[in-house]
Amino acid sequence: MRLLMKLPLLILALVFVPLVASVAAEETKPNFIVINIDDLGYADIAPFGSTLNRTPHLGRMAKEGRKLTSYYAAPVCSPSRAALMTGSYPKRALPIPHVFFPSASVGLHPDETTIAEVLRDAGYRTACVGKWHLGDQPDFLPTAQGFDYYLGIPYSNDMGTVAEGSKSDLGAPLPDTTENPAKAKAAAEDPETGLKGNRQPPLPLVENDKVVGRVKQDEQQAIVSTFTEAAVKFVRESAAKPFFLYLPHSAVHFPLYPGKDWVGKSKNGLYGDWVEEIDASVGRILDTIRELGLERRTLVIFTSDNGGTSRGTNGPLRGHKGSTWEGGVRAPTIVWWPGTIPADTSSDKITGMHDVLPTFASLAGVKGPDGRKLDGIDASGVWLGKEGAKGHETFHYFRGFELQAIRRGPWKLHFGTAGPVKAKGNAGQRPVGLALFNLESDLGEKNNVADTNPEVVKELQALAAAMDADLGVKVDSQGPGVRPLGRVEHPEPFLDHEGKVRANAVGKVEQFP
């Protein structure tokens, strides 16, 4: 009889214990925030050596966290973001020669499993606030790739019209709209990756998959504030459950539009003004995390999508955005998680954008994508400062379809070319013939030591040959490991030149804060 009386309690306990365990597991899952700056140079912030730009919030973040001094992106925007989203080398997941433009017929394939999808399936709330640049057609947008919410510009902030300020800095004269005939002909003959030059329509602000604003000069100048306010709102609304916030700012990409409260405040012109505004945005995000008491279970990573342009500072690295010199691909990166990441530390082990997905999945205690080859690793040991943790042994420097260099340990081998790397600013030329550098003793890649280290050259050439069998290493080659792009017929821009919004893309137009 006594056993029968206890039976309902026993049944209740059996039901309740798994429920408690589930709630406890959810509460211990860390939150993740990725703050990705556009075109920020390696030495544009104080923790990485800047004396021009005042970045006290990033200085505090580094003091409370860990610098990653050998963290790699790609030479340009879209490939770098594809690596972050998919955990793969850009050529594997996004085989394009350069970047996307408005109304491209191709984009990140919907079958790719993004970090947002991995975390959303594990119970996370997910949001992308800022520049997307992985395709602007409905099948390619963030809300089709695992994000519950999106607010931002679907590509770069210079991909709008001359008249509305997308081709000139704040206060600068509008440029001449006369187009070089050869460039115009080439653009017309290569429509796959989107509209270029004067063919580009007005710049839209998109919420989820709807146009909610038109980004002219005033809106460009308010864009950091717009994205920061939306990010803070998401964090506050998501504090009770695990969340993933991806905050890819348009700043500090050309054209330069620092906020009205920031213009003229730095000693480094408009560029420095915008860097300092970005620093304040980071401070606002971290202060919100502290205010909500979430700092002990929130990992924040700050980085850049590629190296800086000639407007920024990449020293002591050589080269700029668009190149595969270190200055084109090594990003100033800080990871912050008080109580978990050791404060005021740094690591020179090789990690990169393609490690974000497997690392976040590991820390969240979930599996990564099934049936997909990842090039990234679980870098949590390096990020969290665990003794004996290892980064990548090898890193492959792709620019578009071409493997231009390879690194193993301290050794970096550039493969020869007869022509310059095409890029904005002084990207420099790759060597004519093989060139080998020891990055431990020659971080600026000044001294070619290939002749005195033939065995190292041979070893790195063998690694390149293995990659050739997987992805292909030439401009005109794609190996069996390359996955297909997403593709649509009859792509349309969000806005046409008359300001007409494409079908089913009209949202409630809201004022900028």
Image (cartoon, rainbow, N blue to C red):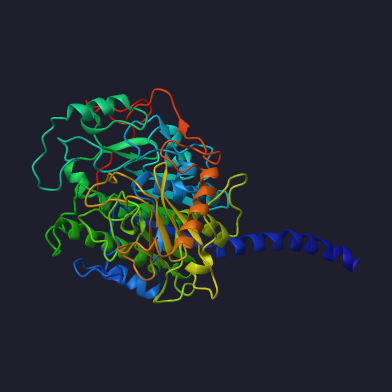
Pick the residue in front: 24 or 379.
379
Q: Is residue 423 left or right of residue 336?
A: left
Kindly tell me whether residue 243 is visible in this rendering: no
Pick the residue in front: 345 or 468.
468
Kindly tell me whether residue 102 is visible in this rendering: yes
Residue 218: % across, % down: 17, 45
Asked which quadrant contains residue 217, the reply is top left
Residue 329: % across, % down: 36, 55
Pick the residue in front: 258 or 72.
72
**Residue shown at 45%/30% (left/top)?**
487
**Residue shown at 15%/54% (left/top)?**
260
- Residue sitting farthest toward the top: 490
**Residue shown at 18%/40% (left/top)?**
167
Asked which quadrant contains residue 211, the reply is top left
**355 in relation to 64, above or below:** above
- Residue sitting farthest toward the left: 173
**Residue shown at 32%/54% (left/top)?**
328
Residue 483: % across, % down: 52, 38
- Residue sitting farthest toward the right: 1
Question: For the image shown, how many numbered marks are present on the structure?
Answer: 0
**90 in relation to 316, above or below:** above
Asked which quadrant contains residue 498, the reply is top left
Pick the residue in front: 324 or 101.
324
Quadrant of the drawing holding the N terminus: bottom right
